[in-house]
Image (cartoon, rainbow, N blue to C red):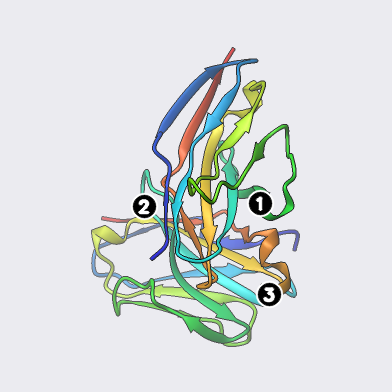
Amino acid sequence: GAGVSQSPRYKVAKRGQDVALRCDPISGHVSLFWYQQALGQGPEFLTYFQNEAQLDKSGLPSDRFFAERPEGSVSTLKIQRTQQEDSAVYLCASIIWLRTEARKGQYFGPGTRLLVL
Amino acid sequence: AQRVTQPEKLLSVFKGAPVELKCNYSYSGSPELFWYVQYSRQRLQLLLRHISRESIKGFTADLNKGETSFHLKKPFAQEEDSAMYYCALSGSARQLTFGSGTQLTVLP
């Protein structure tokens, strides 16, 4: 595809429900990042993959958050037992190869807007 | 720890006036600095990066290591520049650290 895609674009969940958010990075992009953007704030780092390896998950706010990228392309961010404070836009970004291309910046998807009632 | 501060949440200027969006950072090493822009109903996209010292859409930004700043400037603002602007830093940890953003409105 032409860019990073994410689905669903909008998700409404009842508190306590599990949700799964999908990210399709640009074909060939090795590195993939997840960010959480609360209302009125800048994006905040959640986790980072290089191919299928999750190299950094220091930004995940709790053990209810889990991310995977089993085949090194599509990634899924799962949130278990959602809480109201999980309401945010979840952004995915990809970059072709970190060391040589990082200076070109990350390519972002449109985001998934999650509302937990 | 790395941190990015954008002191202005909102900034309004008239068309044709100069505009400066402020960004200060905190990082102990040599950071890479970026400006990202988000136009209404569009995704976040890279505007410019300090390493290339380029001008994009008339915008420039100079990294001032002494003042730890990376302010974004444009001499003559246009209405189509109205958008949310984010300053971001990339250090050794690879991921981007963003400021809270500045909403720029260019008035006719």
Task: Quote the CA–CA distance across marks 2 and 3.
Answer: 29 Å
Q: Nearer the viewer, residue A95 or B25?
A: B25
At label 1, counting other C-alpha atoms closer than 10 Å, the crowd grade (few under 14, some 14-19, many 20 or more) is many
Write the residue at 59% across / 43% down: B37
Q: Which mark is nearer the camera, 2 or 3?
A: 3
Label 2 with label 3: CB-CB less than 8 Å: no
**How far across and how far down the image is residue A92, in percent?**
54, 64
Q: Read off the chain for label 1.
A: B
**How far across and how far down the image is residue B28, in percent?**
45, 64
Residue behind mark 1 = B49
Label 2 amino acid? Answer: Ala
Residue behind mark 3 = A99
Numbered disc 1: secondary structure: strand
Task: Quote the CA–CA distance across marks 3 and 1.
Answer: 16 Å
Position of residue B102 relative to residue B17, above or below, is below
A31 left or right of B91?
right
Position of residue A106 relative to residue B60, above or below, is below
Task: Quote the CA–CA distance across marks 1 and 2.
Answer: 24 Å
Label 3 amino acid? Answer: Arg
* Sequence order check, earlier mark of 2 and 3: 2
Residue behind mark 2 = A38
Label 1 amino acid? Answer: Arg
